[in-house]
Amino acid sequence: MLRNPLLAALALSLSGLFAACRDASTDTAPDSRSRESLVSLSASDREIVRGDNAFGYGLFSKLAAGDPGGNIIVSPLSVSLALTMAYNGARGETEKAMARVLGYGERPRGEVNALYARLIPALVGADAGVTLSLANSIWYRPDLDPKPEFLDLNRDTFGAETSPLDFGAPNAVPTLNAWVSEKTRGLIPEIAEAPLSGDLVMMLLNALYFKGDWSRPFDPKATYKGEFHLADGGTKTCDMMTANASFSVFHDSAADGLVLPYGDSLYSMVLMQPKPGTGMSLLIEALQAGALEGWLQKAGPGRGPIHVPKFKLEYGKQLKETLIALGMGNAFASGADLTGIQENLMISEVIHKTAIQVDEKGTEAAAVTRVDVVLVSLPADLIRFDRPFVFALREKNSGAILFLGRIMDPTL
């Protein structure tokens, strides 16, 4: 029986689409395609992907630690894509901090962008039995005038739509939400609420949509009301799906796992639960240490029955504090260097929303990541003499006033 915090780890596995493509060979479902993944990566590319996955695990771990009893679902890929578009405008220490947190290290920016330019279309077209769409957009205040090379790079790499938008206009929020709703097939209907901040000069958006049917669907007639054991020792009754067939499974000191493939098996959901008595924290630590790849390599066939709960989950989180805790604080500070976009800019917030539904037929999931960019607030003037004033020129020790005057118009 799965424990409640598993839903969080399960969601992370679904969102880690990089790993799903690479590790599809562990699935045991029939496959009409070659077992060679359609996503062909060089050794250098794989290092970037591993770093990106490490960022996802770190993000997930921080969120899980902050809400130990709650359900969590994040899309590391969505967050990475949105932040990497912003990273393309970062320079100096801001660039280094973002690269370090996102897992890019000291690799040239061009190498990172080249990977994404190849990877995005490959992921979208990898499995004919799965629907995956990745959409990106950059909206900016008409008077911002971002550097053309910044917009061109993100258009070429991420297929980003770029458009001026008056964030104070009545149509701004409906425009942004309509884009998000369309790209997520209505699973996430909105990402913005009016009024938007008056300081907002740019918004970068990523929308990810996934829909896949199980390679072996569950029989709805076999679904039953079963007990779900909570971490606090209580139980809840839920709809439990069951099947009796051959599946790919793995066992380790930290976890027991099951691989459920979609479509032609190039995508899969990896379910992981802690070993009895070990707790969720050990499992999450193992994931952060890169254990998933090793577990999937050792996975082998196992015969059912299996029992998996149906569930539907929506999640939303402001990620600013989490990203600062991971080491990206420079990008959110007044000293941020986003001069690749324009002078005097900083990231003010990163907002992430996700939704997922898992049932007998398969999985439908979506994610949206929003990155807000604002003008850096200049230090407030101590005092500004921009209206009539009086002045006195005096000697300090004696207090004698040498000149006393009034300025009504300094141009006279």
Image (tube, helix red, strand yellow):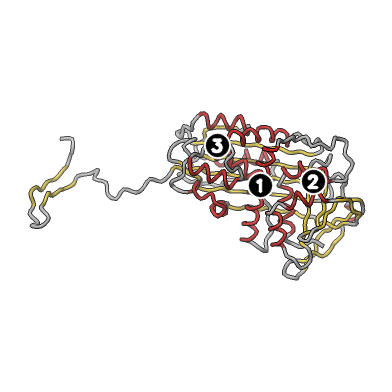
Bin the neighbour count of mark 3 within 10 Å (Cα to Cα): few under 14, some 14-19, many 20 and up: many
Up the image or down, 279 lies above or below 321; here it is below
Tag 1: amino acid: Pro
Kindly state the secondary structure of the residue where label 1 is placed. helix
Name which of mark 2 and mark 1 comes first in the sequence: 1
**Location of residue 237 in the rendering, given as x and y in whole percent from the top left corner:** 80, 64
Q: Is residue 393 visible?
A: yes
Q: For the residue labelled by badge 3, is the local secondary structure a helix, a strand or a loop?
A: loop
Say few, some or many: other residues with alpha carbon within 10 Å of mark 2 (under 14 / 14 to 19 / 20 or more). many
Which residue is drawn at the image coordinates 79% and 61% (left, top)?
2
Which amino acid type corresponds to the residue marked 2 in the rendered image?
A: Ser
Mark 3 highlights which residue? 88
Q: Give the image location of residue 238, x and y in percent.
A: 80, 61
Question: Quick one: label 1, few (<14), some, or many (20+) residues within 10 Å?
Answer: many
Q: Is residue 198 visible?
A: no
User: Residue under circle 1?
Assistant: 76
Is the C-beta separation of discs 2 and 1 under 8 Å?
no
The residue wearing badge 2 is 268
Q: Nearer the viewer, residue 249 or 129?
A: 249
> What amino acid is found at the position of numbered circle 3 in the picture?
Asn
Q: Position of residue 216 (x, y in %)?
A: 88, 46
